[in-house]
Image (cartoon, rainbow, N blue to C red):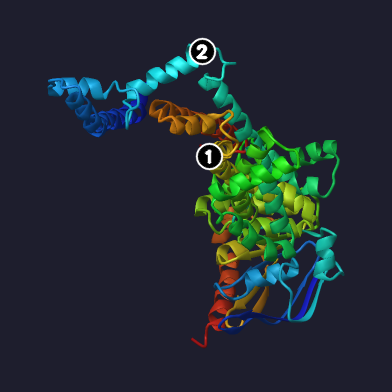
Amino acid sequence: MISVKDVDLIFETNDGPVQALSNVSLEIEEGDFVSLIGPSGCGKTTLLRTIAALEKPTSGNLMVNGLSPEDARKNRAYGYVFQAAGLYPWRNIYRNVSLPLEIMGYKKHEITRIVEKVLKLVDLTGFEKKFPWQLSGGMQQRASIARALSFDANILLMDEPFGALDEIVRDHLNEQLLKLWKTTNKTICFVTHSISEAVYLSTKIVVMSPRPGRITDIIKNTLPSDRPLEIRDSKEFLSVSQRVREGLRSGHSYE
Amino acid sequence: MINYFKNRFLPILSIVIIIFAIWYIFTIYLNSSIQIDTYERQKIDWEFSDLVKDTMSQKKPLLPAPHQIVSEMYKTIFMIKITSKKSLIFHSYITLSSTLLGFAFGTILGIILAISIVENKAMDASLMPWIIASQTIPILAIAPMIIIILNAFGLSGLLPKALISTYLSFFPIAVGMVKGLRSPEISYLDLMYTYNSSRLNVFWKLRLPSSVPYLFASMKVAIAISLVGAIVGELPTGAVAGLGARLLTGSYFGLTIQIWSALVMAAILAGTLIFILNFISRMTLKSMGGQE
């Protein structure tokens, strides 16, 4: 579904070139839930943006749905959820969710049906007329996820969507996201810096480390697909977390 | 209600009282030398109380007292038919109509310039210096030229005056709109990019709505200087009509009370226009989800 091969990305800055991604290779299968985890500066967001064609790799090969990222973007192959909800403040929730549909030329009655459907998916029915500032941070982020789901792209790229939320809200949203992923059969690529979030959500955990940004470990999650929140206290959960932690530590060994 | 009185009305009222007090003191002070001259020429014995009374009731005072201006305004607004050339309403209407026409032109011109600057690289590189240069020319110098040149083309009356307002008012609109159209955050633009949105959609659904608060802020500045432009435009037309004409005839004949009442009228007009704009702005921004 998404194939990354030997990708390098070098940013030219005023202080000279910065190697944001170094020799990154990754395969994401259809229906996967892949988390990119690592300390800040490890290139996890950059990798996500590269998949989304928001950045261009300096060298290497990248395919999304069998197309170049640029063509995949033009085909509207993915929905992108930003770290800040990024709802347009002058549009109410309904019109925020309908924004991509309007741009993509959906018919009016289709838009009404779809918006209703995706708002129900993220449990925001009844908030159509509210403006973003009238919603809590967690609700805003849910609206933003609804917006990314609305045009039915089969890939969902999420850049630390719950990073700014408190732990209680985050737990709740993690549970909802997992449910959403199962019902919609999307392929999700999820950036986070929380180990427990990554282990709880993913089928595959990609551990990255900085300077230069690179992948140090790819861990297949052995947890069963049915995951109540309590699973985080299980032995298996802790052992997967342990492996992720070791991966993160080894990336830092030069320090 | 009581809070409104305490927080809004009372501070404004106290400032007004202070200004009036200072004004009256200056009226007495500035007009006294002429008054004392008059007393001496006519060999009249006078006391301070006479001086106070008489300095406030001169025909052509250096500085008229507020109540003289009020009574002049009352006379020229309510006591005279509004079709008469002596009516202040008549002159205000003339000035207001060219203000509004010029402001409308200026707003449209400013928006068009801003859009072309933001959407076109060549315009961006070339236009701004000229726009700024246009405002460095003193309007008093260029206004008569515009009137005379347009007159040569057979244009007279309302339009040339309105164009002077346009000349002044397009500038804040253009500058504010350029800033407004460029105000969307990177992530908002990135989002549009992930939708593979057309430029037209980015403009209509992102840049334009983002610029609305900037537009209203600029319009408030623009409408006030439109009024100034209209008054300045009335000066070289030979004092036919309008508040500018009242100012000019007033200064020909030393009718200071007439000058001051025209000035106060201009201030009232400007205040009213900005009040109306404020109201429209608040309603619009509210419908766009603005939090007061």
User: Measuring 56% from the left and 50% from the top, which residue is drawn there?
Assistant: B141
Query: In the image, residue B142 lies at what x, y percent?
Result: 59, 49
Is A9 in front, or is B25?
A: B25
User: Measuring 59% from the left and 45% from the top, which residue is drawn there?
Assistant: B143
The residue to which callout 1 is attached is B228
Q: Quadrant of residue A127?
A: top right
Is B136 in front, or is B252?
A: B252
Where is the N terminus of chain B found, in terms of image quarters?
top left
Q: Which mark is residue B80?
A: 2
Is A200 in front, or is B79?
A: B79
Query: In the image, residue B76 lies at what x, y percent?
Result: 47, 17
Of tags 1 and 2, the one toward the viewer is 2
Q: Is residue B81 above or below residue A9?
A: above
- Does residue A92 appear in the picture of this structure? no
**Amino acid type at mark 2:** Ile
Is B232 in front, or is B254?
A: B254
Query: In the image, residue A210 lies at what x, y percent?
Result: 58, 79
Q: Which mark is residue A212?
A: none
User: Measuring 68% from the left and 60% from the top, which residue is drawn there?
Assistant: B127
